Amino acid sequence: MSTPDMNYHAIHITKDKCIGCVHCMSACPTRAIRVSGGKARIIDQLCIDCAECLRVCPHDAVHSHTTSFASLEAFEYKVAIPSTVIYGQFGSSVLPNEILSALRRVGFNEVYDLSSICELNCAATEEYLHEHPRPRPFITATCPVVVRIIQRRYPSLCAQILPIEPPREIAAKIIRTILPKALGIAPEKIGIIHITPCPAKVVSINSPATLSKSYLDGAISIRDIFPQVLKALRKSEEDALMRHLFPETLFSGIGMGWSLSGGEVRGLKRHRAVAVSGVVDTMRVLDQVEGGLLQDIDLLECTVCPDGCVGGPLGVENRFLAKSRVLELVAAAGEHAVVDQKDVSRLYHKNFLSFDHPVAPVESRPLDRDPAAAIEKAKLREKLAAELPQRDCGVCGAPDCRTLADDIARGYAGIEDCPFVTPAKKEKP
Amino acid sequence: MGEAEPVFRRDFPVKGGDFAKAGAAACEIKEILKDLGIDAPTVRRAAIIAYEAEMNVIMYAWEARMALAVSPGEVRLTVDDRGPGIADVPLAMTEGYSTATAEMRELGFGAGMGLPNIKRNADVFAIDSEVGRGTRLDITIRTNGHKP
């Protein structure tokens, strides 16, 4: 089995734009950023691609490796499966059907709505929970950052990730199964692209944690494609009227709210679920799960963006308006179900919806491989931490004093990096 | 004097009734064990033990000192509290037994998992309690050790 590069990242710092301020370093929830030589640097082993740094950088120096529209020229037939987040991006007069048809005008041969697959995923999840009474809680795998956090920081929870692929992969797998035959086009000439507000989807496509290969060929950010979609929408008001009168896609009421925190589990009827959003809160709750709590919960939905995927950093509309719009659409769609539970059950029992392999922990970063040496380094770290001023100013290039002590114990920094430790103290061996 | 092998020690004070910090010591203990390169299943067992022990102090005792000592091969946790003590230790060690109040249960605690859960996850478990004085737990977890 080929092992994908577990340290592949979607988030990068553009050196030319970085001025070495400490916004990203302070915002990083895993303390993965250091500033040295006037530039911020991401420690690959610690980064979880949550994009908190991208959100706060005042100099636009943090960018994400999403797919460019131009690169799709390589495909003869282009299919888009936009995240349901897109329905909340264009105000309250633009209907989902118009957005899908505008995407066709932008240059996609085919565009598929994901709300029905979200509903399908929910039905399969319910079935899985029913068949597996233990362990509790299971954790949803939709947010690729949550999977990364668990692999790196909560390795013992890998077995609690619910092994059903997220809607984007299920949709791409279905399309990849039926389209080449239907069109008579070679599979590799069909490009299936996700459209997303999330930089981490590129990670799950290029370095999948649960598939030997992703069924998607790339992920375009909503931000990048937004201007073209807006232009297409403006040019086609007549068309919009037709779409209102004669919608071609039936949206799932259960799947429509998937992009909001709690949306993934809203359709569960027989199980108890809890939804958490935001990276810090997600980690707090995962700490509790690792400590043996929340065992009375069947399913834990975690999304690291605030309010769910709708709060993704590569969207355009602010998340409060986007959320309000999605809620309108959810209300309009009602409890409308578009998938048949029996069909879902058949696909589920064929393992069509399952992971290829379970999520594996990514090797952690102990102070030392040798247990005795690690203990000595931990003692040194305690001693150093007591000597540092606890002001967490960041001047040394580490986000806080504790992290500087850790860096020194690992040999990556020196006590002289701290501007508060007096010269007399610095001379001590 | 002089220990044959290195030992990492750290004390964590825990205050009774301090629900705002519930789990803080257990989380720190877990982070330290991961940094020391302890295997994930052992860290999980230690996390569950530390969480339960810390919650017991917060819910029932006045204050306690949780002492962590890690040497290659084993993790020791000693929890020494000043508190009401436990009148009937064998009863408190019974699965499902709990004196948690409705509010505590509301918060998700007090399912009667505490002490039996600690014992189940430990390799060596000793409890000593005196009514009106307090309770002392002595727990050893062997790293890479296997519990059935």
Image: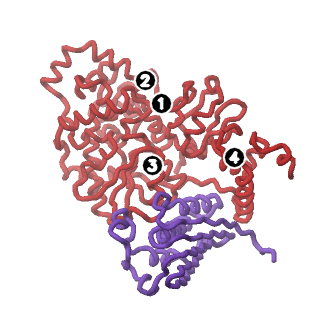
Chain colours: A red, B purple
Kind of residue sitting beneath label 3: Asp
Marks 4/2: CA–CA distance: 38 Å
Q: Residue at x 37, y 40 (%)?
A: A307
Name the residue furthest top: A235
Marks 3/1: CA–CA distance: 26 Å
Marks 1/4: CA–CA distance: 33 Å
Is A18 drawn above or below residue A414 in the view shown? above
Marks 2 and 3 in Cβ contact (< 8 Å) = no
Residue pointed to by mark 4: A404
Residue pointed to by mark 1: A66
Left or right: A41 in relation to B47: right
Reading the chain from its start, which is encountered first: label 2 or label 1?
1
Chain of the residue under label 3 = A
Is A156 drawn above or below residue A78 in the view shown? below
Reading the chain from its start, which is encountered first: label 1 or label 4?
1
Residue pointed to by mark 2: A224
Kind of residue sitting beneath label 2: Asp
Q: Depth-wise, is mark 4 or mark 2 nearer the camera? A: 4
Q: Are marks 4 and 2 on the same chain?
A: yes
Kind of residue sitting beneath label 1: Thr
Percent x, y for residue B37? Answer: 64, 61
Marks 4 and 3 in Cβ contact (< 8 Å) = no
Q: Are marks 3 and 1 on the same chain?
A: yes
Percent x, y for residue A125? Answer: 30, 54
Q: Secondary structure at mark 2?
A: helix
Q: Residue at x 60, y 74 (%)?
A: B78
Percent x, y for residue B80? Answer: 58, 75
Is A144 drawn above or below residue B42 in the view shown? above
Residue pointed to by mark 3: A281
Reading the chain from its start, which is encountered first: label 3 or label 1?
1
Q: Are marks 2 and 3 on the same chain?
A: yes
